[in-house]
Image: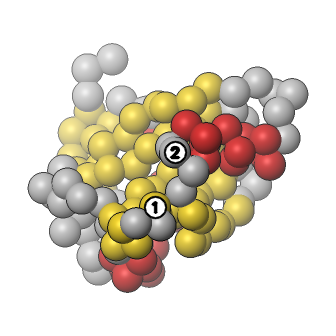
Amino acid sequence: MFGELKVRRILSLTKMETTDEAIAKLLKFTDSPQILRWFQFPTALVIFVVHFDCPDCGAVYVYDRKDCVWFWIDFDDQNYGGYSPSEFDLLIEQCHFFQLAESPALLSSPVQWLVTPGQAPSVVKRLPA
């Protein structure tokens, strides 16, 4: 579970939109899931969402408050059905995911991150610019 971090930019917003509006746009874009976990930082917002019909198939999103961009977070771990709430809790409690999420510029940088339980995120390689 977990491994190389995959980050996809999914929505760009304007600086005129509030955090509530940014969340509403994400929820509309992702077919109105339920937010199960919500963490706010000065530079970012991290949410974990699930759909009502599949509560163990959640997704992780990070909002970069400075650049007004939503990122979808996934991992190269062959877990194609999403993550359960307990797996998300493992991600934040044992993988130190917030070290990356609190600085969204790290997520969009040309660095490939490795996220594994019991360790801080580490650099695997630099991606081509």
In the visual, does 69 lie left or right of 129? Answer: right
Callout 1: 10 Å neighbours few (<14), some, many (20+)?
Answer: some
Q: Are marks 1 and 2 in contact (CB under 8 Å)?
A: yes
Q: CA distance from mark 1 to mark 2?
A: 8 Å
Query: Looking at numbered disc 1 in the image, what kind of residue is underneath it?
Result: His
Could you say which disc has been placed on residue 51 in the image?
1
* Image coordinates for residue 54, horizontal then vertical, percent: 36, 67
Q: Quadrant of the N terminus?
A: bottom left
- Res 73 visible: yes
Residue sitting at 55 percent across and 37 percent down?
29
Q: Nearer the viewer, residue 53 or 106?
A: 53
Residue linked to disc 2: 31
Residue sitting at 86 percent across and 28 percent down?
16
* Image coordinates for residue 122, horizontal then vertical, percent: 30, 57
Q: Secondary structure at mark 1?
A: strand
Could you say which disc has been placed on residue 78 in the image?
none
Residue sitting at 52 percent across and 45 percent down?
31
Q: Nearer the viewer, residue 94 or 39?
A: 39
- Extreme-front residue of the structure: 53
- Extreme-left residue of the structure: 78
